[in-house]
Amino acid sequence: MPAGLRGAPPPTIAAALEHMIDIADHRSSAPEKGVSFWTTHH
């Protein structure tokens, strides 16, 4: 079984997701909305 399927995603995927979240937060007119979204949906 690939290590990425055991729980934590591979570092590259984790970094890519964080980068996408960063871009979404910067593009949003209300950054706190993105923060609340990730806080309530995790």
Image: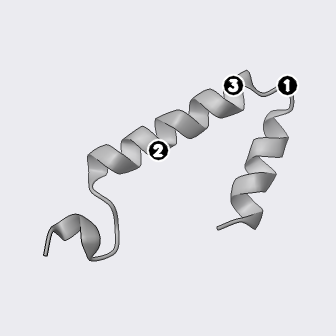
Instruction: Check if mark 2's residue and mark 1's residue have beta carbons within 8 Å.
Output: no
* Residue 34 pos. (x, y %): 75, 44
If you read the primary sequence from the N terminus, does the residue marked by circle 2 or circle 3 appear first? 2
In the displayed orientation, state which residue is furthest to the front. Answer: 1
* Residue 19 pos. (x, y %): 48, 34
* Residue tagged 3: 26
For image coordinates 69% across by 56% down, the residue present is 38
Q: Secondary structure at mark 1?
A: loop
Q: Which mark is residue 29?
A: 1
* Residue tagged 2: 17
Q: CA distance from mark 2 to mark 3?
A: 14 Å
Q: Secondary structure at mark 3?
A: helix
In the displayed orientation, state which residue is furthest to the left. Answer: 1
Q: CA distance from mark 2 to mark 1?
A: 20 Å
Q: Which mark is residue 20?
A: none
The quarter of the picture where the C terminus appears is bottom right
Tell me where residue 7 sits by quadrant.
bottom left
For image coordinates 24% across by 65% down, the residue present is 4
Q: Is residue 38 left or right of residue 10?
A: right
- Name the amino acid, label 3: His
Residue 16, relative to residue 39: is it above or below? above
Q: Is residue 15 left or right of residue 40?
A: left
Tell me where residue 30 sits by quadrant.
top right
Give the class, few, some or many, for how many residues have Cα within 10 Å of label 1's Cα (few <14, many ≥20): few
Q: Is residue 18 left or right of residue 5?
A: right
